[in-house]
Amino acid sequence: MEARSAMSWYCGSLLAVVIALFLSVSLGVRAAGVGVSGGVDLKASCAATPHPDVCLRALQADHSIKASAASPLDLVAAALRAASTAGGAVGDYARHELDVVKDNLMWQCLNECAEDIEEALDHLDDTEGGLDDGKIRDVKQFLDTAEEDTWSCDESCKHAPNTPIKAALVAKNRDFEAVMRVANALIKRATGGGDAPAPVPPAPRFIN
């Protein structure tokens, strides 16, 4: 009886240890934004960004993202593609309206905004063809600077008259800036806040 009780106690203790280890590993994986199946948890990853809703919409719209297999760097690549798409929409709108407006201040607003957007897109487009250490470092540096500086269509257009064109431009630019902040947060999450990880293969861009 004593031997059987001892064996029962030992088995019960071993089972408790196994369960505790499993829960510890499971919680650790989820805290890192990785699903139990091995892919990233989109909701957990986006929750760590300044704009979770914007993040989720951008990632879910990217057909190259499969949550069951995506890596943190896949999310970075998708967010950068979304930022390029959003920025392109602002730049195209500003350039189109330049041919229409008559007011000098509004023309200046559109022109300066378009130039800022095009500069940003030059940095984002450098990530095409796959992400390597240098590209991630460069785009992260640009995004950090963009978050700290005051450049924006808001700044360029603060003296322009309040018109539907200005309102639409500023709204599109804010969408662009939100996606850039999401991309920067995902880069920091994927790289541990600094060092760039190993390269990932290129992924297709959005097609409007």
Image (cartoon, rainbow, N blue to C red):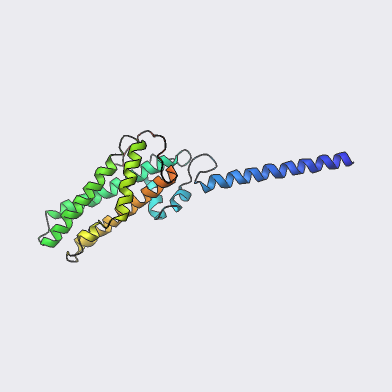
Taking the spot 17% from the left edge, 54% from the top edge, the residue there is 112
Task: Report the side of 101 relative to 90 (left or right).
Answer: left
Q: Can you give x and y, in whole percent of width and height, for residue 76 in the image?
A: 38, 43
Residue 169 quadrant: bottom left
Report whether 164 appears left or right of 176. left
Q: Position of residue 105 (x, y in %)?
A: 13, 62
Q: Position of residue 100 (x, y in %)?
A: 12, 56
Residue pictured at 37% horizontal, 33% vertical = 201
Viewer-nearest residue: 106 or 136: 136
Residue 173 visible in the displayed image: yes
In this rendering, position of residue 129 left or right of residue 67 = left
The reply, left or right, for residue 183 in relation to residue 25 is left
**Between 151 and 59, the one nearer to me in the picture:** 151
Q: Residue at x 28, y 39 (%)?
A: 126
Residue 128 vertical position relative to residue 144 in the rendered view, above or below: above
- The residue positioned 41% from the left and 35% from the top of the image is 198
Looking at this view, name the residue that lies furthest to the right: 1
Residue 62 visible in rendering:
no
Q: Quadrant of the N terminus?
A: top right
In the image, 122 versus 110, the foreground residue is: 122
Q: Position of residue 130 (x, y in %)?
A: 34, 35
